[in-house]
Amino acid sequence: MKILTTLAVANLAASATCATADPGGTGSTGGRQIAESPKLCANYASHASYLAKAWGEMPVFTGTMGDKFIMRLFANQSTGTWTMLLVHASGTSCVRATGKNGSPSPGL
């Protein structure tokens, strides 16, 4: 879990801006199709609702970054899909990464 946290914080600290879309499935979306997804940056409630309805993903991990940002990891433990959001104190969230083939780490 500490490795996941360290990697997530390093990724988020590298850029506080939103990722660009990759509908072709060759980059940051991990091969997931996002053509019907909401904007990469949107209201947090919109993102959370979409992830639950479209992908069956629920929040599984949250970490803070200073005073203004929260990293929230959503996952569907049955299908292995996951999404990382960077949430600003204003309530705006941005998709930072998505993927598939996720699984719980032993001992968690």
Image (cartoon, rainbow, N blue to C red):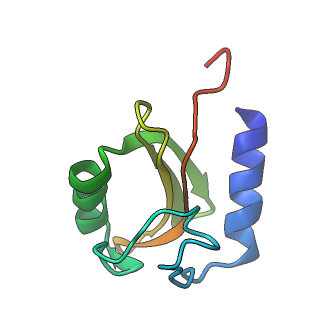
Q: Position of residue 18 (x, y in %)?
A: 54, 81
Query: Total label count?
Result: 0
Q: Considering the image in quadrants, where does the N terminus appear?
A: top right
Q: Position of residue 81 (x, y in %)?
A: 47, 47
Left/right placement of residue 50 relative to residue 101 reads: left
Q: Nearer the viewer, residue 29 or 71?
A: 29
**Quadrant location of residue 29?**
bottom right
Vertical arrangement, residue 14 with respect to residue 55, above or below: below
Q: Position of residue 2 (x, y in %)?
A: 75, 35
- Front residue of 98 and 41: 98
Q: Residue at x 42, y 37 (%)?
A: 79
Is 48 situated above or below 17?
Answer: above
Above or below, comparing residue 16 to residue 71 in the picture: below
Q: Quadrant of residue 97?
A: bottom right
Query: On the rendered structure, is 20 left or right of 44?
Result: right
Quadrant in the rendering for residue 106: top right
Q: Residue furthest top?
A: 107
Residue in the picture at 57% in, 39% down? 102
Q: Is residue 42 left or right of residue 24?
A: left
- Horizontal and vertical percent position of residue 22: 53, 80
Residue at 31% x, 72% y is 37
Point 55% across, 85% down: residue: 20
Image quadrant in which the C terminus is located? top right
